[in-house]
Amino acid sequence: MSSKVSLTRYLIEQQRIDGHIPSQLRLLLEVVARACKSISQAVNKGALGSAMGSAESENVQGEVQKKLDIIANEVLIEANEWGGHLAAMASEEMDSIYLVPNRYPQGEYLLMFDPLDGSSNIDVNVSIGTIFSVLKKPEGDHGVEESDFLQPGNKQVAAGYCVYGPQTTLVLTVGDGVAMFTLDREQGSFVLTEEHVTIPADTQEFAINMSNMRHWDEPVKRYIGECLEGKEGPRGKDFNMRWIASMVADVHRILTRGGVFLYPWDKREPEKAGKLRLMYEANPMSWLIEQAGGAATNGKQRILDIQPTKLHERVSVMLGSKNEVERVTAYHAGL
Ligand code: P6P
């Protein structure tokens, strides 16, 4: 019988192979995975639990919070604050950073997360997920400040998400490819179900919210317009479209079968660089996509090279199958 490889065993064996996972980082990833299991349980209860609906409050993004947004945020904070592996955390649901209380040992890592991405889908039973990104705290014995988090995505030491769909699947990279772990509810543990995930360089499937078409910049209108022209147009092939309005679910599909995802800047709020957040949505997802052989840009530069200036800054996102991302990026350069 083929023995199942648990998340713990995978992390230990990976550490032996390439030393990418020091013990404190392994502890961090296992704690985050355990927190995702708890969030999955709360999400799966649905209307049978007491966590559905709006929390009648707004987050720093000005978005109405769902009860589960707040619960997921609290689960991640409580799971991680005492372990001694973290110095501080940051979340889409919190205005400022969260310092590990002095009563707990301080660690060397910074954890950022969107505790429940796509939460507008909760009440209609569509897949949602948790996205997380891990940085190292900069050297020095100063206390942690918000500026310590403002590192480009190419400084991440781990990144991943957990998608709460027909299966609960944890997807992870520490810089040596992408691995997927499916929650075995009978055993209560994540089991390795895919590793060395790769995305085909070409695709015939794009993901974008078409209702915003009239607001897009010309290069995006040109790119999507050519996809819509199909076989008769310059692309010479037909395209299919998907939009789940849950980045985790759309990215999971792309990691599973290829595709291209776009949430570009548009004219509705021209002062904002885009809708999605750089630090805890675009950066972790872009690293996963690149580790699987794809590409991720903001139309002008590699997302992972963007130097952040604010914790909750937004960014235009184009990611997925390499040849498609390179094409839409070239259109932004007028090519
Ligand atoms: P729209 C969810 O709110 C989210 O942040 C992403 O997960 C998703 O891709 C996007 O916004 C959906 O945005 O404008 O289509 O509802």
Image (cartoon, grey):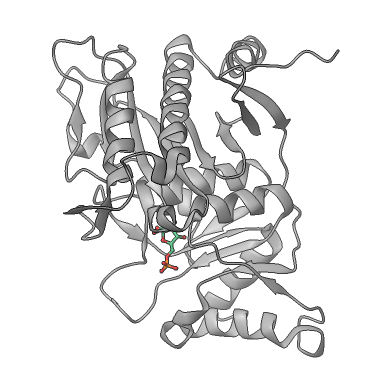
Residue depicted at x 59% and y 13%: 15
Q: Is residue 28 left or right of residue 249?
A: left
Residue depicted at x 31% and y 40%: 50
Q: Quadrant of residue 197?
A: top right
Residue 262 % position (x, y): 53, 66
**Compared with residue 158, is residue 204 higher up or lower down, i.e. above or below?**
below
Q: Residue furthest front?
A: 48
Residue 331 % position (x, y): 58, 77
Residue 198 % position (x, y): 73, 44
Who is closer to the viewer here, 18 or 37?
Answer: 37
Residue depicted at x 44% and y 38%: 45
Who is closer to the viewer here, 152 or 246?
Answer: 246
Residue 49 % position (x, y): 36, 39
Which quadrant of the rendered structure holds the C terminus? bottom right
Which quadrant of the rendered structure holds the N terminus? top right
**Compared with residue 119, is residue 264 higher up or lower down, i.e. above or below?**
below
Tell me if residue 3 can be seen: yes
Q: Quadrant of ligand 1?
A: bottom left
Q: Is residue 191 left or right of residue 246?
A: right
Q: Quadrant of residue 212?
A: bottom left
Tell me if residue 153 can be seen: no
Q: Quadrant of residue 172?
A: top right
